[in-house]
Image: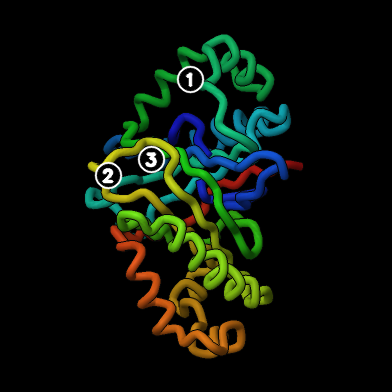
């Protein structure tokens, strides 16, 4: 459903493990959908019983690196832009969408008794496509996302001429900080928007914070105690000030991983 099949940030061999082969960057296709009124339970079952099986075939065939589905937590309901994100990870730039014949073959291999046309019709009856973003994965830290864990998507707009400075702040400041929290289960991913583009967009960059539980999400990241150990010469308030010179945070969404399909 959910973006037909798409890849985010979410990351990596399990959620957001945005790693790539050494010779090429990793990309993520993130598909945002709304569920048709009264179809929530049926859509959730379709996601588990059909899409996850289809994606397992494509991952096992090496055409997709990983896949996950994220369900909206905050905001949710009519105010939520997306009820689900369907996120597909790729090693290298995403290929073209599968043809109808290829999809039918994939469905058969997955043990699903339907054609590509029947699959598309069912998908359209359950969901409405809102948006597709293609992200380039820039950096990551922490463990892969697991089913039931929580994700905080931080959408940013990079200020003119500040892209390189922002990436440096994230990769030399925030990344080693998260890496120091290796026993916490917290994770982090960094992405820049590859498609679409243009000045009309409200965001063009994304960080993904992952949390092992709802309680961990509520506790947040222990900057007061852990940050000084990693960056003794850079107070956290100063780091935030430097970051604010490079980007503006457009939106924050909280979601829960409801399906994760990783390489075997």
Secondary structure state at the residue bearing disc 1: helix
Q: Position of residue 227 (x, y in %)?
A: 54, 84
In front of the other: 144 or 117: 144
> For the residues marked 3 and 1, what is the alpha-carbon distance in whole angstroms?
18 Å
> Can residue 55 be seen at all in this image of the molecule?
yes
The 10 Å Cα crowd at callout 1, few under 14, some 14 to 19, many 20 or more, is: many
> For the residues marked 2 and 3, what is the alpha-carbon distance in whole angstroms?
16 Å
Task: Find the residue positioned furthest to the front.
Answer: 161
The 10 Å Cα crowd at callout 3, few under 14, some 14 to 19, many 20 or more, is: many
Task: Between label 3 and label 1, give the one nearer the viewer.
Answer: 3
Q: Position of residue 73 (x, y in %)?
A: 38, 58
Q: Which residue is located at x 56 percent, y 46 percent?
A: 259
> Can residue 31 be seen at all in this image of the molecule?
no
In front of the other: 75 or 20: 20
Judge left or right: residue 128 versus residue 115: left
Residue indicated by mark 1: 119
Q: Which residue is located at x 61 percent, y 88 percent?
A: 229
Quadrant of the rendered image containing residue 263: top right
Q: Which residue is located at x 43 percent, y 19 percent?
A: 120
In front of the other: 96 or 161: 161
Judge left or right: residue 128 versus residue 20: left
The 10 Å Cα crowd at callout 2, few under 14, some 14 to 19, many 20 or more, is: few
Q: Which disc, if any, is residue 22?
A: none
Q: Which disc, if any, is residue 201?
A: 2
Task: Between label 2 and label 1, give the one nearer the viewer.
Answer: 2
Query: In the rendered view, would you say 165 is above or below 197?
Result: below
Residue indicated by mark 3: 32
Q: Which residue is located at x 58 percent, y 54 percent?
A: 147
* Label whose residue precedes the other's in the sequence (3 or 1): 3
């Amino acid at each position: 459903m959910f973006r037909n099949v798409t890849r985010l940030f979410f990351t990596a061999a399990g959620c957001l493990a945005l790693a790539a082969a050494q010779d090429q960057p990793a990309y993520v296709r993130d598909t945002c959908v709304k569920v048709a009124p009264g179809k929530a339970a049926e859509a959730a079952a379709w996601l588990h019983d059909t899409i996850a099986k289809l994606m397992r075939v494509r991952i096992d065939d090496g055409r997709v690196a990983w896949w996950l589905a994220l369900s909206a937590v905050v905001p949710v309901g009519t105010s939520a832009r997306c009820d689900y994100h369907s996120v597909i990870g790729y090693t290298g730039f995403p290929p073209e969408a599968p043809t109808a014949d290829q999809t039918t073959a994939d469905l058969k291999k997955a043990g699903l008794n339907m054609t590509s046309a029947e699959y598309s019709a069912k998908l359209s009856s359950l969901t409405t496509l809102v948006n597709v973003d293609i992200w380039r994965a820039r950096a990551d830290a922490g463990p892969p996302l697991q089913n039931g864990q929580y994700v905080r998507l931080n959408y940013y707009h990079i200020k003119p001429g500040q892209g390189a400075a922002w990436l440096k702040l994230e990769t030399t400041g925030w990344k080693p900080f998260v890496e120091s929290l290796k026993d916490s289960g917290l994770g982090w991913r960094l992405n820049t928007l590859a498609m679409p583009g243009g000045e009309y967009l409200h965001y063009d960059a994304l960080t993904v914070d992952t949390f092992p539980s709802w309680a961990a999400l509520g506790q947040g990241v222990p900057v007061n105690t852990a940050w000084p150990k990693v960056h003794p010469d850079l107070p956290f308030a100063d780091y935030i000030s430097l970051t604010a010179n490079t980007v503006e945070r457009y939106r924050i969404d909280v979601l829960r991983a409801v399906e994760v399909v990783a390489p075997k």
